[in-house]
Image (spheres, rainbow, N blue to C red):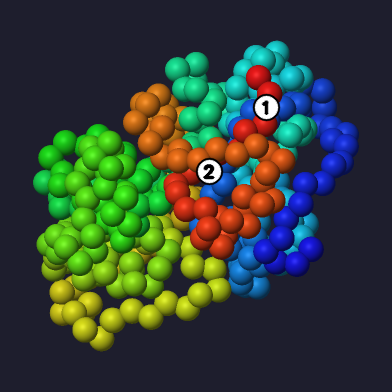
Amino acid sequence: MSPGRGEIVTSACPPARLPKGEVAVVRTLYSAVSRGTESLVFQGRVPVSQYEAMRAPFQEGDFPGPVKYGYLNVGRVEAGPAELVGKAVFSLYPHQTRFHVPAGALTAVPDAVPPERAVLAGTVETALTALWDAPPRIGDRIAVVGAGMVGCSVAAVLARFPGLRVQLVDVDPGRAAVATGLGVSFADPAQASDDCDLVFHASATQAGLRRSLELLAPEGSVVDLSWYGDRPVTLPLGEFFHSRRLSLRSSQVGAIPPEQRGRHTVADRLGLALDLLRDPVFDLLVTGESDFDELPDVMAEIASGKLPGLCQRIRYGTS
């Protein structure tokens, strides 16, 4: 299939390859589209050098495509270990109505977290990783540049910290209402405060990353959560970057930051993300919902920019 096109394929669930009790059958309740990464995958824009690194845990097919892709799935266990049967679970499984999966790949959704909100677990997990990469300090002046799913998740978690000044920065003035709901201030990039100790960049644009550097006070740091796919990025490193002794580092959810590896596992981190989702404020991040059979057209509209918003939730019509 050519880039920019999708279709729903009917196939039988493959037979379980693990011993009985180690595999679960899950029927999907909701999934969600990770707008940035899935749009680049949908458009065939994964760099050849990143084909292996960007594989989703349960991806089928190879880049550039066709591939079955996705990693924000909440379903209900129909069969498997007794402690999971009937439970709502989160997994890094693509958009699919029903599937077999190793039971160890499932995380039970807390009873206090609605399944429809739990699809945000992977995005909140990304935000937690970024905050572990550059822990905020009491009194820090912080900007989050890019009010998409990831940026808003970072802002939502930062809003829980005492003594911080947190500003959400975006070119879309409509995101001001989201910022208010999350409990942080909002600014257009041109008006954003430029004395930041720490900036989290999540706009996935060259302009956003350049502005993030400009917002730093001397000795400040930018943590870049964006993935640019095959797009080159040019930065003004010949200007104030060295004289201000600025830092730029990447953050990626694929691994636990070194400072946390002795205390936290990947399972711990996902469990913490789900626990944070007890807070209904995260419902602000879900701005659209579609039926599963609409997904090919919805994905094309998201990738082309015709369907803006934050999290686009996919509904499967099951209970």
Q: Which of marks 2 and 1 is nearer the N terminus?
A: 2
**SS assignment at label 1:** loop
Question: 220 left or right of 269?
Answer: left
Q: Position of residue 243 (x, y in %)?
A: 15, 79
Question: Residue 30: which disc?
Answer: none
284 to 147, vertically: above or below = above
**Within-10-Å neighbours for mark 2: few <14, some 14–19, many 20+:** many
Q: How far apart are marks 2 and 1 (CA)?
A: 16 Å
**What amino acid does circle 1 point to?**
Gly
Residue that appears at 84% across and 35% down: 13
Q: Could you tell me which quadrant the C terminus lies in?
A: top right
Question: 319 left or right of 247?
Answer: right
Question: Residue 312: which disc?
Answer: 2
Residue 92, by quadrant, is: top right
The residue tagged 1 is 317
Residue 269 visible in the displayed image: no
Question: 226 left or right of 83?
Answer: left
14 to 29, vertically: above or below = below
Closer to us: 45 or 126: 45
**What amino acid does circle 2 point to?**
Gln
Q: Position of residue 128 (x, y in %)?
A: 38, 43
Q: Where is residue 171 in the image (x, y as percent from the top left)?
A: 31, 61
Residue that appears at 19% across and 46% down: 185
